[in-house]
Image (spheres, rainbow, N blue to C red):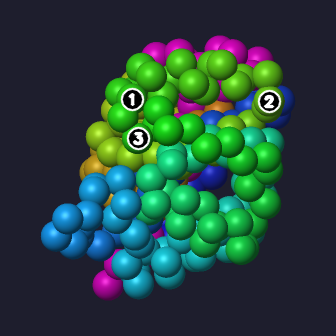
Amino acid sequence: MTGNTKQGSGSASRLFLLRHAKAGWALPGMRDFDRPLDATGHADAEALGAAMREEGYVPDITLCSGAVRARQTLEGIAGQADTGRVIFCEKLYSEDAAGYLALIQQNAASGSILVIGHNPMMEDLASAISGDGEPEAQAALGAGFPTSGLAVIAFRGGLANAAPGAGYLEAFHAPARG
């Protein structure tokens, strides 16, 4: 994992945007929705959970896509870290970045939120709502949003203030690949 965290974020609420872990290709006759994680994806999800625990990233709720690969990512993380109350949202499979933002705003009263979803929505949303951020985190996000990528975005005054340009990108974690 690589990442950078801003210290002293005070009373900011955090939004954790996580692209599901690496999945295998669909087998003949298999729907994209049903693609499971491959061995790398399972290992990355568990490593990310351990990193979240070490960093103290504890969401109050998790909004998780119903796709198999997203659910399995959640399982890998939950074996290592607290994921708060989990809500499965089928819309996270098909919504665009604006739809993701609407779901986040609808759940803003819950506190910090972890969203486990898909690209390009994750990358689009993280880029749109991060008005400023740690230079290392911004550079990492600018290089793309890989599977198991995690953007940590803070909002002063709570997630009700989540809007384009309103967040501060505290960290961006990506799996170490050799």
Left or right, 177 with reference to 102:
left
Q: What residue type is labelled 1?
A: Glu
> Which mark is on residue 93?
3
Q: Which of marks 1 and 2 is nearer the N terminus?
A: 1
- Cβ atoms at labels 1 and 2 below 8 Å apart: no
- Residue 174 percent location from the top left of the image: 44, 63
Question: Which of the two discs, 2 and 3, labels the residue nearer the N terminus?
Answer: 3
With respect to residue 56, does 66 lie above or below?
A: above
* Numbered circle sitting on residue 95: 1
> What residue do we see at 40% from left, 69% from top?
36
Residue pictured at 79% horizontal, 22% vertical: 109
Query: What crowding class fits label 3: few (fewer than 14 Cα within 10 Å), some (14-19), or many (20 or more)?
Result: some
Where residue 105 sits in the image (x, y, percent)? 63, 19
Q: Quadrant of the C terminus?
A: bottom left
Decide: marks 1, 3 in contact (CB < 8 A)?
Answer: yes
Residue closer to the observer: 167 or 102: 102
Extent of the magenta region: 155-178
What is the C-alpha distance between the residues marked 1 and 3? 6 Å
Q: Name the residue under label 2.
A: 110
Q: What type is the residue that disc 3 sits on? A: Tyr
Q: Is residue 69 above or below residue 135?
A: below
Picture coordinates of residue 7, whole percent (x, y): 72, 46
In-image side of 46 versus 97 (left or right): right
| Callout 1 secondary element | loop
Judged from the image, the secondary structure of the residue bearing numbered disc 3 is: helix
